[in-house]
Image (tube, grey):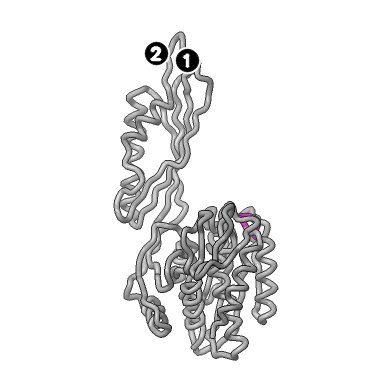
Amino acid sequence: MINKERLITRFMEYVQIDSESKNEKAIAEKLINDLGDMGLEIHTDDTRKMTGSSTNNIYAFLQGNENEEPLLFTAHMDTVIPGNGIIPNIDGNYIKSGENTILGGDDKAGITAIIEAIKTIKENNLNNRPIEILFTVCEEIGLLGAKNFDYNLIRSKNAVVLDSSGAAGKIIIQAPCIYKMDVKITGKASHAGTSPEEGINAIIVASEAISSMKLLRIDKETTANIGSISGEGPTNIIQDKVEMEFEIRSLSEDKAKFQIEHMLECLNKSADKHGASIKYSISCGNRLFSIDKDNEFVKFIENKNEKIGVTSNITFSTGGFDANILNNNGINTVVLSVGTENVHTTKERLNIIEFEKLSKLVLELMIV
C-alpha cells in the first residue's frame, strides 16, 4: 500500500529544505503543515531557548484503536554540514546528492517514512494503534532536542527511532555511553633561543602523553579519540599552554571509565616528568542503552519484518542516537535502519529499495 512514487517525491522535496543543526525552522514549518493536513494533533515545545535552534521539537498524535498500546515514532529534523542547497538526483536504485553537499537522508528518510505511513493509513482508512510522533532538533550536535524534551507528554512505553544507515531489517538494541574530556596543560614560558632549559613546553608534555595512550579502536565495544589540540604561539617562546579535547565511547560504563583513567594516567605521568600541571573536566554526553534481544518489543518488530519479507539483523552501534535519551527516560526504544549509505559525507546516498522496505515496516508497526 505504500505509494513508492509519492514516497520518493516527498523525500526529494524534504531534503531540498535547508535544515543544518540550529536552522531547522523551515523543515519544521513544512512538517507541521503536512501533519496538520492529515488531521494530527500537533504541539511544539519551547526548547529552542536551551538548544539554540531556530525552532522547537514537534510532537504529534494520531488517534487510534484504544485497545492497542500506543507507539512512538521519532526522527530528527537537522542535518550535518554541508547541508544547504542540496540537489537530489535518482541514479538507478539510489538517490544521491551533488558533489558539494550531503544528501540529508540522515534523517529525512526516517521523517519521510513516518509521514508516508500515516498518509497511507488515512487514505485507506486503516485500523491503526494510537501513534505518537516526535521530530527533534539539534540531534547531530549532541542530541540537544531529545535531551530537553518533556517526556511527561509521552504515553507510549515503546518507541522506534528511524535513524541508522544500512539495509532494512537492522534493529539496534545497544548504543554507547559517550564521554567528553577537556584537558588544559600548563608549563612554563621562556625564551626558546636564549634560555630554553628554563621553560616547560606544554606541547612536548601533550605529545608524550598522547603517544603513550591507547586510542581509536580499543576493543569491539570501546573507542577513544583526540578531536582537537591547540597551543599557538611564536616560535621563539616555549609554549606554556595547551588545550585538548578527547572523546570516549563504550557499550560498557566500566570500560569507558577504565579508558578515561588510562588516559589521565598518561597525562599525569608526562606532566610529572616535565614539571607541568594539568587541569581536566569530564562530562557525559550520552548514557548507554542496552535492550535484551529477547525483549517482547524487539520480537514484535522481528515479526513485522518477517511479515513483509525482510530478515531482521539485531545488532549494536557505537554511534549515539536520540534512543539513548529516550531509553534513559524510561521509554523502551530501538533504532531502525533507513537505507542510507555513507552518511555525513558528500558521497551519501539512499537505497530506494531498502527505503521502501523501511516504509512498509513503519506502516506495519502502526496498523493493527
Q: Quadrant of residue 290?
A: bottom left
Asked if labels 1 and 2 touch by Cβ distance under 8 angstroms, the answer is yes
**In the shown orientation, is residue 37 left or right of residue 283?**
right
Instruction: Describe the element under mark 2 as helix, strand or loop.
Output: helix
Residue 197, which numbered label? 2
Q: Which residues are magenta?
A: 20-24
Residue 266 spot, x, y in % from top left: 33, 35
The reply to whether residue 159 is in sight is: no
Q: Quadrant of residue 115?
A: bottom right
The residue closer to the viewer here, 276 or 102, is: 102
Camera-side residue: 35 or 279?
A: 35
Is 26 situated left or right of 306 in this image?
right
Q: Is residue 311 above or below residue 109?
A: below
Please give the name of the residue rendered at 35% of the width and 71% of the height, measured from the top-left corner: 313
Depth check, front residue: 142 or 89: 89
Quickly name the residue at label 1: 190
Query: Residue flagged by tag 1: what amino acid is it?
Result: Ser
Residue 317 at x, y = what percent?
Answer: 39, 61
| Among the two numbered marks 2 and 1 on one chain, the one whose residue lies closer to the N terminus | 1
Residue at horizontal 40 percent and vertical 82 percent from the top: 309
Mark 2, residues whose alpha carbon is within 10 Å: few (<14), some, or many (≥20)? few
Q: Is residue 198 visible from the viewing direction of this image?
A: yes
Question: How far apart in space, not on screen, are marks 2 and 1 (Cα)?
Answer: 8 Å
Q: Is residue 192 left or right of residue 211?
A: right
Q: Position of residue 83 (x, y in %)?
A: 60, 55
Q: Secondary structure at mark 1?
A: loop
Which is the main secondary structure of the residues drawn in magenta? loop
- Please, what is the three-letter code of the amino acid marked with disc 2? Glu
In the rendered image, residue 21 lying in the magenta stretch gets the answer yes
